[in-house]
Image (cartoon, rainbow, N blue to C red):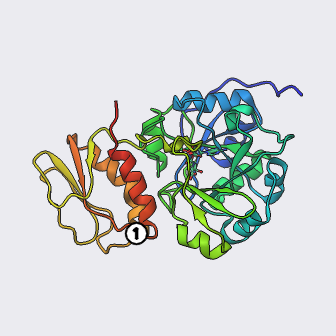
Amino acid sequence: QTAPMREPRDSTHLVKIEQAARILRDGHVVAMPTETVYGLAGDAARDDAVLEIFETKARPRFNPLIVHCADLEMVQRLALFPKLAQKLADQFWPGPLTMVLPKRADAPVSDLVTAGLDTIAIRMPKHHLARELIAAAGFPVAAPSANPSGKLSPTTAQHVLDGFEGRVPVVDGGPAEEGVESTIVAVSDDQLVLLRPGTIARAQLVEATNVPVLDPQDKTIKAPGMLLSHYAPNAAVRLNAVDCHDGEAALNFGASGLESKHATLNLSPNGDLAEAARNLFSLLRQADQQGVHTIAVAPIPADGLGEAINDRLRRAAADRN
Ligand code: TXA
Ligand code: MG
């Protein structure tokens, strides 16, 4: 089948659902709110739309995208659905969980989305505007986080406008409720592999399924979002700081008490990990905007949601070149 003709690209601003759906049907990209972070959406079936996603982000083509669906019917046209996937869907969809599943041979999805893999990453977002947009478009959308590749993920519409300098139209859904990207699990018949920690914690996955949740064997894996230097602010990031040096901004958690002349911020004064996740990317940006050479970050507990927060912080702190 031939793709529909592509209308020329216009707009540069905030758009409503109907206009956003039209942009998607015209084969272009639009940023949409989700409960995790904002996504850069395009028709998952169209090469031209998916290419526009990669080009807009300057994302390496070998890094596959998550496909977002509004309902299970859409999902089942794309992927095989083992029993274990059904269990997870019952418990966590719609919501911040992405499942990597065997792709159907006849799935109406551009090969660019899966980067040639025989699996496909699928998520059913909870944010009502994401759901309305996908339903209005009438097809699944591929959507990576709506930031230039390697930069901090956006949790507000303004972050998206800033990141792409107004070149991408955005549906404004307010600040993201979760604040870090979805938990990604590879699902087979009898086990799960946790490819990326998120706000659905490891323990919740075990509790919901009673199967082991393993770590990826091969660290070069296929969850390339896993490239170490990712989510990077311009400043360097120093983890587990117990004091704050000259020229550093301070990012506290609970009563950690780091103090900076430039910016003294707190992920959650009460030590609440959900609040810390929600604030993480915004406060890293805010600290970064002070022009400091380094952001000193207090220790964050490792359990529960802390696994996802520490994962993003380690990536932000990783060596870059
Ligand atoms: O919360 C989220 O997941 C956000 C919102 C917009 O939905 N999206 C997001 O997308 O974080 P992105 O592209 O930034 O991260 C997608 C991750 C990448 O690490 C990619 O490698 C992995 O999903 N991925 C995609 N398809 C995969 C597959 N078939 N197998 C393994 N990993 C896959
Ligand atoms: Mg991303």
Name the kind of residue labelled 1 in the image: Leu
Q: Is residue 81 left or right of residue 212?
A: right
Q: Is residue 229 above or below residue 311?
A: above
Between 228 and 220, the one nearer to me in the picture: 220
Q: Is residue 186 left or right of residue 6?
A: left
Disc 1 element = helix
Q: In the rendered image, which quarter contains the N terminus?
A: top right
In the current view of this chain or complex, which residue is farthest to the front?
Answer: 217
Q: Is residue 263 above or below residue 267?
A: above
- Measured as percent of width and height from the top left, residue 33 is found at 57, 52
Q: Is residue 12 left or right of residue 114?
A: left
Q: Residues within 10 Å of mark 1 (few under 14, many from 20)?
A: many
At 47% across and 52% down in the image, what residue appears? Answer: 155
Observer able to see residue 34? yes
- Measured as percent of width and height from the top left, residue 280 is found at 38, 56
Observer able to see residue 27? no
At 56% across and 50% down in the image, what residue appears? Answer: 217
Q: In the rendered image, which quarter contains the C terminus?
A: top left
At 51% across and 45% down in the image, what residue appears? Answer: 219
- Measured as percent of width and height from the top left, residue 54 is found at 59, 30
Residue under label 1, please give it.
Answer: 273
Q: Image quadrant of residue 20?
A: top right
- Measured as percent of width and height from the top left, residue 56 is found at 55, 30
In the current view of this chain or complex, which residue is farthest to the right?
Answer: 1
Q: Is residue 135 left or right of residue 288?
A: right
Tally the marks. 1
Q: Is residue 2 above or below residue 38?
A: above
| CB at disc 1 and ligand 1 closer than 8 Å | no
In the current view of this chain or complex, which residue is farthest to the left?
Answer: 246
Q: Is residue 209 above or below residue 282?
A: below
Q: Image quadrant of residue 289?
A: top left
